[in-house]
Amino acid sequence: MKHPSRNTAPPPGIHVRLGDPDANAVADRLVWVHEHDVAERVWRRDYTLWGSEPNEISDRLGWLTVADHMRAQLGELSSFVAEVRAEGYTHAVLLGMGGSSLAPEVLRLTFGSAPDHLELRVLDSTHPDVVTAVADELPLAQTLFIVSSKSGGTLETRSFYAYFRDKIDDGAHFIAITDPDTSLADLAAKEGFRRTFQADPEIGGRYSALSPFGMVPAALIGVDLGSLLSKAEAVEKESTSATPETNPGLWLGAAVGELARRGRNKLTFVVSEPIDSFGLWVEQLVAESTGKNGTGIIPVADEPLGAPDLYSEDRVFAYLRNTSAPDRELDERLDALAGAGHPVITVDFSEPSDLGAQFFLWELAVAVSGVVLQINAFDQPNVQEAKDLAAETIETYLSKGRWSEEEADVVQGQIEVFGAPGASSLDEALGALVGKAGPGGYFAIMAYVPPSAGADAALTSIRNSVRDARKSATTVGYGPRFLHSTGQLHKGGPGEGVFLQIESAGGEGVEIPHAPYGFDALLHAQALGDLEALRSRDLPVLRVHIKGDPVGGLETIAQEIARIT
């Protein structure tokens, strides 16, 4: 068998700019993956690539051929969409979390809704203001609800369903997407759901974009699934090659994994339109697959680009570039970063349907990076911990009739600060936390607030201030969505994080039918449970509670951080 040269070039469609030390290390790693038959072993589902035991490895590789299986279901999906359109449905709401919600959200943002198809809304926030907004703003009589959960028992998803089923006593308004024989499948049969789509149990949630979890919502908004799957199948075919020069997923995973081993573990995504929302999905894939056992790759999505001297030597820039509509300004900024010695890996795409190719490419790349990092890319050992702590917090609340939490260390207007003993003001508390961020680490903002353009702007301002002043990578996650995304990395990955938790008060009285608490209590318990999980690891974390307008509170925090940095 011919082995690649030490200076292996990337496959067509991938372009790389690396300094000599990084380039040499990547070249050696590419030879290594070839000599160890990594591609061949992936396709024969050899669990020993990722661990010594087959648990949650050998039964998590169904994504390798899911595009082929979905193609066989295109006629069935087309008939289903025609059925609901003929019955007058105009909107769809996906009730899900993590792997069940992120790919549909990216598909929605990329493609919008085709003429005469349903408009999609993704509900993955337990903030009561967000839940009630969906109920108030949509014509419920013409809305189809997609109850989406791989396990069937996801607490948030089941709570969303209980809330909307209480408003619509007609099972025809609901469909389920779940694995076979789950409690959700049983519920759907018992309560007369219009349809249950069974997913492949051998595909984990974060690898499920091209499965029914992504394709059913995509069909409802009129995405050309045939084109999307064709693009995925083309990369799938290329990925059977044993040599990195002709296998883009193998090459990319080996390179990213090796650079992470060398300390460049902040994988920073720069994504051109129209797939610029891709970071929402790939963030979970990277974080939950690699962030464990004290190691991992930190995905940095949607952080505005800065000047080259604002970054430390822990970055790798992954530039998804639209070759049919090049952004010349973005090209020049990436050129400047590469010229300053920062690794830049450019991946070409040319049209929206290439999103299918990108889904498969990065799934394989992340699986291969797990091989390089010597971790199991398919488990999530620390995710359950925060869930258990949230459940314990809820139980304490119900038994005592109050929250067992400390008193605020600082109260400034509508903002309360917890976990800052000795601080006398908001800026002092924030300054102490930001001062712990620096080169080689990351600053994570965990925002349990309603997502909005105003919130996005304020959170971006915080990111810019911290990055510019401290040369620290920054991430933002809306809670509780991020618990199913980057939460695993926060607790199981390298202990490099500095954490700012921001929570806004939600409307009381938004009850969850058949539960002894409402959405406000659920959100608060999730925030406190995650806080406790971080504190138990002695990670630096500050909790800020906004009692008034969440956007106004975020803007105040952003202004204070800008002033002190």
Image (tube, rainbow, N blue to C red):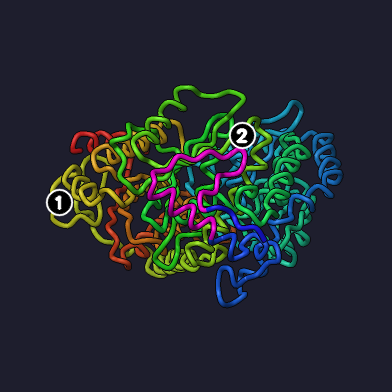
Residue at 41% x, 31% y is 454
Dividing the picture into quarters, in which one does residue 323 lie? top right
Residue 339 versus residue 267 in the image, above or below: above
Residue at 57% x, 58% y is 367
27 is within the stretch colored magenta: yes
Q: Secondary structure at mark 2?
A: strand
* Residue 423, numbered circle: 1
Q: Which residues are magenta?
A: 6-31
Q: Secondary structure at mark 1?
A: loop
136 to the left or right of 439: right
Residue at 78% x, 47% y is 172
Dividing the picture into quarters, in which one does residue 412 lie? top left
Give the mark, 2 or 1, whose residue is nearer the N terminus. 2
543 is within the stretch colored magenta: no
* Image position, residue 449 (x, y; %): 42, 43
Which residue is the extreme one toward the bottom?
53
**How many discs mark residues in the rendered view?**
2
Callout 2: few (<14), some (14-19), or many (20+) C-alpha neighbours within 10 Å? many
Asked if residue 132 can be seen in this view, the reply is yes
Residue 46 versus residue 503 in the image, above or below: below
Callout 1, which amino acid? Ala
The quadrant the N terminus occupies is bottom right
The quadrant the C terminus occupies is top left
* Image position, residue 122 (x, y; %): 60, 42
120 to the left or right of 558: right
The front one of 494 and 160 is 494
From the image, tell me which residue sits under label 2. Answer: 349
Using the numbered discs, state the Cα–Cα distance from disc 2 to disc 1 in whole angstroms.
50 Å
Residue at 45% x, 48% y is 299
* Image position, residue 301 (x, y; %): 45, 42
492 to the left or right of 60: left
Circle 2/circle 1 CB separation < 8 Å: no
